[in-house]
Amino acid sequence: MAEPSIHPPLLRWAAAMAVLALASLAGCMRAPPPVAFHAEGLPETLSAWHLFKLRGGELAPNDGVLPYELNTPLFTDYAHKLRTVWMPAGTAAGYRADETFEFPVGTILSKTFYYPRLAGEPADGARVQRSDDRTGTRPGGRLALAEVRLVETRLLVRREAGWVALPYVWNAAQTEARLMRGGSLVRLELVDATGASEPAAYAVPDQNQCAGCHASDLRSRVLHPIGPNARNLNRDLAYRGDDGGEIIRNQLAHWQQAGLLTGAPEPASAPRLADWRDSAGASLDARARAYLDSNCAHCHSPRGPGNTSGLWLGSDVVEPLRLGRCKLPIAAGQGTGDRRFGYVPGDPDASILSFRIESVDPGVMMPELGRSVVHREGAALIREWIAAQTGECGTGDEPSGTDVAENNNDQQGRGP
């Protein structure tokens, strides 16, 4: 019996398909382009920077892009955040104990905001999880796209003239993020573990609003990073090893070993901010002070936009009156909620601090930007901190808010 013959055109078709398959496989295995630093201009897409690679159902930092995490991050409507840093080859950040590190020209800091997805919800679904777990995260700063809903990626880019803020919003397919200089509003529904939900009007800031937090020095009024400082980076992080497994290292030590940081001491000698969630390993006072430091101190500091309030909330502040204890307000208006003092020891219900943290009224709430819902757990922590304190506020013997403001102005040469 004769063997069946294969028609020549069919052979050519099969050969062509094999070539295409090999080319496709090679394309998948090809290394992504290196990170592109744009010294000027406003690239329209996030992909123009080559900070990330989308491959195998994951969003992952590109080669040389290092993920990092903070001990106590800023609250943003329960969003999770993937933070990364990239610096040009041969450059490094300069260590500073009490301020944000001194980053070289060419640095790109990114912060990707995302939520764990609910089962059955589409990639761009409005219903997302309200949780603090690590759903969708993998070692090395990778995100499983089937498990998370990407919202935006903000870049802080260090150019010759200074830092530039660029907000990019992810598309419905979760394949690209486009520059939104005018900001955007994303309507979400936050669903907790019990199935209860609440609406959130997630605000992507415009470039001017970025300055509301990042231009936190009233003297210079220039943008600069807030989070990457010694006290917030001094913690362990799970990095991805060559075998794909986890390697746990202290971030300060890892940055220095990788050549991205100079002048840093041993981690044990560096300042460290508490993790506000770590009730087993940190005191109530340390956790509450860390929360106020990360969520409030970029404005409420001697140099920040909230300096004339006399309320300074950095973790290094030691004077109780500066922290609001029995402090009369200066110009809070309706923000006082008819409460007399910044906070009253033992009585959060009589404290302005609790009132403003627990409000969603735009004319009252603090922080003013970055949230549309109450951070229940954070508010509960501050309530617990106030309730645990003892003592009483007087009726006229304590320094007034006006006295504090005048002292602030005297120190800064600003006049009354």
Image (tube, grey):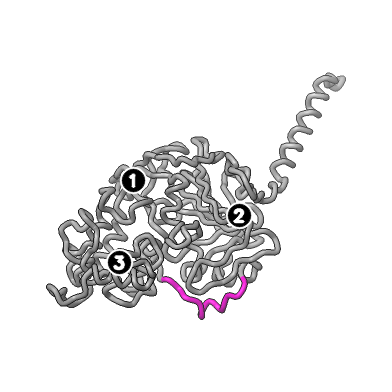
Label 1 Cα crowd, 10 Å radius (few <14 / some 14-19 / many 20+): some
Identify residue type, mark 3.
Pro
Label 3 Cα crowd, 10 Å radius (few <14 / some 14-19 / many 20+): few
The answer to whether residue 235 of the structure is visible from this angle is no
Location of the N terminus by quadrant is: top right
267 in magenta: yes
- The circle on residue 416 is 3
Magenta-colored span: 262-273
Residue on which disc 2 sits: 159
Q: Residue at x 38, y 51 (%)?
A: 370
Q: Which of labels 3 and 2 is toward the front?
A: 3
Q: Is the residue under label 1 in contact with that under label 3 (CB below 8 Å)?
A: no
26 or 304, nearer to the observer: 304
- The circle on residue 191 is 1
Position of 49 with respect to 395 (left or right) is right
Position of 372 with respect to 114 (left or right) is left
Q: Residue at x 51, y 69 (%)?
A: 236
The answer to whether residue 9 of the structure is visible from this angle is yes
Quadrant in the rendering for residue 341: bottom left
Q: Residue at x 57, y 53 (%)?
A: 157
